[in-house]
Image (spheres, rainbow, N blue to C red):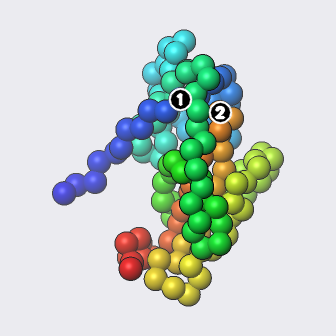
Amino acid sequence: MTLRPFHLAFPVNDLAAARAFYGGVLGCAEGRSSPQWIDFNFYGHQIVTHLVEGAQTDAAKNPVDGHGVPVPHFGVILAMPDWEALADRLRAAGTVFEIEPAIRFKGKPGEQATMFFRDPAGNALEMKAFASDDMLFAA
């Protein structure tokens, strides 16, 4: 099977803040938009921020490797240099991390660089990188 881009639509409470965060901080190119939504190129995938007043974004936290991982969350797996550059960019932008950039499962199958942060509407994102993509589904 050929890997294809995914599409994800999710709620935000302020389109200008979403545009500044996804377009400005994360550097995602903007696609189509309307007064109710904005498409972004999220590392080759299509995400759509939909204006939804009063949307709830924080459901729960799940313990993983000593941290409370926000659920739900979404993100992408980057190459390690891109992950490091993004972590630097987020720090420079003053991003508050839900879970600071770090290596999880060090020395174990599935060792990965990970970081969690939220967009201005409170949607949780996780960005990951592996030293080797072979570890993506390691048990």
Above or below, comparing residue 17 to residue 126 in the picture: above
Instruction: In the displayed orientation, state which residue is furthest to the top.
Output: 35
- Identify the mark nearer the N-term, 1 or 2: 1
Question: Residue 78 at x, y = what percent?
Answer: 51, 60
- The CA distance from mark 1 to mark 2 is 8 Å
Does residue 123 appear to the left or right of 93 in the view shown?
left
Task: Check disc 2: other Cα within 10 Å, few if <14, some if 14-19, many if 20+.
Answer: some
Query: Could you say which is closer to the camera, residue 72 or residue 12?
Result: 72
Q: The N terminus appears in which quarter of the rendering?
A: bottom left
Task: Check disc 1: other Cα within 10 Å, few if <14, some if 14-19, many if 20+.
Answer: many
Marking on residue 11: 1
Residue at (68, 27) in percent of width and height: 17
Does residue 74 appear to the left or right of 25 in the view shown?
left
SS at circle 1: strand
Question: Residue 9 at x, y = what percent?
Answer: 44, 32
- Identify the residue under disc 2: 121
Name the quadrant containing residue 84: bottom right
Question: Residue 52 at x, y = what percent?
Answer: 55, 21
Instruction: In the displayed orientation, state which residue is furthest to the left.
Output: 1
Above or below, comparing residue 70 to residue 111 in the picture: above
Query: Could you say which is closer to the camera, residue 8 or residue 45?
Result: 8
Please say if the residues under marks 1 and 2 sit with CB atoms less than 8 Å apart: yes
User: Quick check: can you spot residue 21?
Assistant: no
Q: The C terminus appears in which quarter of the rendering?
A: bottom left
